[in-house]
Amino acid sequence: MDYQKEGNDYSGNELTGVAPHTVVSVIKAKTEPGFYANLSYNFTDEIPLNDANTVYSNAYHLVQSRIGFKKELFENVNIDAYFGIDNLLDEKYSLGNDLNAFGDRFYQPAAPRNWFGGVKLNVEF
């Protein structure tokens, strides 16, 4: 790539903010009675955070899981009770990167391992 900015030549550098490799996989299962489970995996390779390619984010692996029970209670009325875990491996990664950031403030820290749960009632009219 041919790229020059403010007297600097960044030609041939990796594209700022773009991971060279990413992998996303999801496994889903559900049963006739209404139980379900999801497991997702996301790998993001290191990302160049400035045009000079002198600062990179670390590569990271994310795993999320969710289990639940979804059932039709009445006609047009459904319930979904669920529990899940985000960032199962407790990775330290940036939720969003500020590219070419002033003062080298590139990272927006993401939440550590966390749990969630809920009950959703859906009524269709």
Image: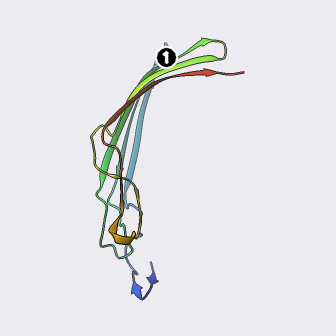
Quadrant location, the N terminus = bottom left
Q: Is residue 1 left or right of residue 125?
A: left
Identity of the residue drawn at 27% across and 41% down: 90
Q: For the C terminus, give its image quadrant.
A: top right
Above or below, comparing residue 106 to residue 68 in the picture: below
Hey, which quadrant is residue 19 in on the image? Answer: bottom left
Determine if residue 8 is in view. Answer: yes
Name the residue located 39 percent from the left edge and 69 percent from the top edge.
101
Q: Residue furthest right?
A: 125
Q: How many marks?
A: 1
Please state the horizontal and vertical placement of residue 25, each as a whole percent of the image: 40, 41
Q: Label 1 amino acid? A: Gly
* One can see residue 36 in this view: no
Residue visible at 58% across and 18% down in the picture: 78
The residue at the far bottom in this view is 7
Residue 41, percent across and down?
Answer: 36, 41
- In the image shown, does 100 or 62 lie closer to the viewer? 100
* Residue 68 position in % (x across, y down): 44, 22
Q: Nearer the viewer, residue 69 or 102?
A: 102
Camera-nearest residue between 22 and 3: 3
* Residue identifier under label 1: 34
Q: Residue at x 54, y 18 (%)?
A: 79
Question: In the rendered view, would you say 11 is above or below 19?
Answer: below
Left or right, 89 with reference to 98: left
Label 1: which secondary element: loop
> Going by the image, does 118 lie left or right of 65?
right
